[in-house]
Image (spheres, rainbow, N blue to C red):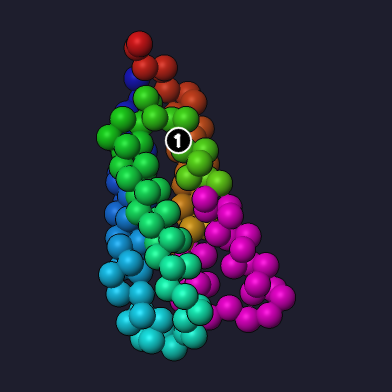
Amino acid sequence: MKTLLPVRILFAVAAAYDGLLGLAFIIAGPQLYAFFGITPPNHWGYVHFAAGILVIFGLMFAAVARRPAENRNLVQYGILLKICYIATVGWYWVHGDVPAMWKYFMGADAVFLVLFLLSLCALRAAPAPAE
């Protein structure tokens, strides 16, 4: 049986990345916007809600890291998250301008997207967990 260690590591890194990024925007959103010179939205609830969703996805990625075969069905939602973010930032980048910070996150999400797709192939090839 092929080891799922690379998948575990990938999703542990994804859990830390999205979870800590979400926490950073919950805890220090105004400071991050100021540091990067970005005009904040008219209400911090928009930022906190999106950041909370990142924390939730971070928890989901941690579940995949702990038990990849058993939680392989969750990987597709991570793929959709990454596609959604890439498409949103990409759309606004093509049709105007997007602050550099969001472009860097888009680049990171593009890497995660490719790796998530590869991990999904590996997980589909892995034996199904015993019930």
Q: Does 95 appear in magenta?
A: yes
- What secondary structure is the stretch in magenta mostly built from? helix
The relative height of residue 50 versus residue 81 in the rendered view (above or below) is below
Nearer-the-camera pick, 23 or 70 = 23
Look at 37% across and 49% down and name the residue there.
Answer: 56
Q: Image check: 83 left or right of 111?
A: right
Question: Is residue 116 something one can see in this rendering?
Answer: yes
Look at 27% across and 35% down and name the residue there.
Answer: 66
**Which quadrant is home to the N terminus?**
top left
> Badge 1 local density, few (<14 within 10 Å), some, or many (20+)?
some
Name the spot of residue 88 as percent of width and height, x first.
Answer: 61, 63
Look at 41% across and 17% down and name the residue there.
Answer: 127
For the record, the magenta segment spans 81-107
Choose top left, top right, bottom left or bottom right for residue 35: bottom left
Look at 45% across and 35% down and name the residue there.
Answer: 74
Q: Image check: 64 left or right of 102?
A: left
Q: Which residue is mark 1?
A: 74
Q: Amino acid at mark 1?
A: Leu
**Which quadrant is home to the C terminus?**
top left
Name the spot of residue 106 as percent of width and height, x first.
Answer: 52, 65
Choose top left, top right, bottom left or bottom right for residue 129: top left
Name the spot of residue 25 as percent of width and height, x first.
Answer: 35, 69
Residue at the farthest top position:
131
The relative height of residue 118 versus residue 114 in the rendered view (above or below) is above
Choose top left, top right, bottom left or bottom right for residue 48: bottom left
Residue at the farthest right position:
95
Q: Does 34 appear in magenta?
A: no
The relative height of residue 94 versus residue 87 in the rendered view (above or below) is below
Question: Is residue 100 something one can see in this rendering?
Answer: no
Nearer-the-camera pick, 18 or 34 = 34
Q: Image check: 104 left or right of 10?
A: right
Name the spot of residue 95 as percent of width and height, x first.
Answer: 72, 75
